[in-house]
Amino acid sequence: MSSSSLKTVVVGLSGGVDSSVAALLLKEQGYRVIGLFMKNWEDDDTDEYCSTRQDLIDVMSVTDILGIDVEVVNFAKEYRDRVFSTFLQEYNAGRTPNPDVLCNSEIKFAAFLDHAIALGADFIATGHYAGLQDFDGKRQLLKAEDGNKDQSYFLYRLNQTQLKPALFPLANWLKPDVRAKAEAAGLPVAKKKDSTGICFIGERPFNDFLQRYVPQNPGEIRDLDSGKLLGTHQGLAFHTLGQRKGLHIGGVKGHDKEGSGEHDAWYVARKDMAANVLYVVSGHDHPALYVDEVTITDMNWIAGEAPHTHWVYTAKTRYRAPDAPCEIEQIDDQRVVIRFAEPQWAVTPGQSLVMYESRVCLGGGIIESARMGGKPVVTADLQSLTD
């Protein structure tokens, strides 16, 4: 009998293959495993896009096969108060938030953690692709072995208290191997499609969802270079920097490519909140879409203290962005300037910038403003995030 058999771990089960295999692995390691299914959204759980009922059925099937207990808990109020309210506030201000980041820090590693401890848990676990290690008296968050699935970006707001009881069983697993493990164990979710998009929106068109909560405020779409009126938008909240699709100005061509008759697509480059004007540029590589300096605020350093300034680190300005070499300059406890070795494309206020030193996730913050060559390019008033 392993020492793990004396320890209780509560696993967040979503009904997907990743959390199911995480529970399976922990049971094989000798832990006493309890499953916990979180219901975080209630507004339209009869809607065709909501998968909660099927997910719960899948959880029950998995836990029956694994022979573990499962509890269903409703965190819908906590989710609305701690995550969704900020989501709406930021969109109404013209910024582009990442609610999945807040969901991890405020629900999965806060409300869920508190509930698990009340159940007598020694540890909590999830199916996140991320790793952990102890170094110099601190708990470090690591990138997962599967670089294509790594989710450390979404966990950067966690602190030492939240990471201390955490387990990530899939840290060294590749996704195909996870599915193979599930299939070998006879789990019915082995081939279940991965969920995509924001957790409470599901597979529905994003703008259709947003229009239910954010009022439309039509305004002009103009060419940033010429000032020419190109069309109208339904509201700045419905657009994000770097956006190409959904502008509905396809009939108004961009700049001609050296007389070839071909035209570049339009991309969102600026939002003038005061004038309610959306500015676009022609071409993916237009200079207005690039910045080399970013100010971030609402900082969280996982170690509880800032790393060395003016050392070379890497950073991601969005989840799927490549790691970009950079250095940091600490301005104060909540604000940091990041200077990139190479310009970064479509850096978006409200999104998270996450810092790394090799595989170690250092932490990050919310993008407040950006510059190119020392000149302001995009800015955002992020006071709401720190109120």
Image (spheres, helix red, strand yellow):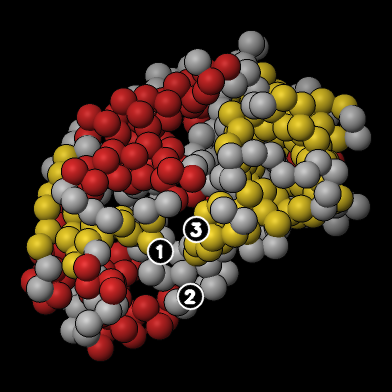
- Residue at (37% x, 37% y) in the render: 106
The residue tagged 1 is 168
Q: Position of residue 96 (x, y in %)?
A: 54, 33
Tell me if mark 3 has few (under 14), some (14-19) or many (20+) residues whose alpha carbon lies within 10 angstroms of its own.
many
Question: Pointer 2 and pointer 1: residues touching (CB < 8 Å)?
Answer: no
- Residue at (12% x, 49% y) in the render: 72
Q: Secondary structure at mark 2?
A: loop
Q: Secondary structure at mark 3?
A: loop
- What is the three-letter code of the residue carrying label 2? Asn
- What is the three-letter code of the residue carrying label 1? Phe
Q: Position of residue 330 (x, y in %)?
A: 76, 32
Q: Nearer the viewer, residue 1 or 94?
A: 1
- Residue at (44% x, 50% y) in the render: 163
The residue tagged 2 is 172
The quarter of the displayed image where residue 73 is located: top left
Q: Secondary structure at mark 1?
A: loop
The quarter of the displayed image where residue 194 is located: bottom left
Between discs 3 and 1, the one toward the N terminus: 3
Location of the N terminus (image quadrant): bottom left
Q: Is residue 205 left or right of residue 141?
A: left
With respect to residue 284, does 208 lie above or below?
above
Q: Nearer the viewer, residue 196 or 351?
A: 351
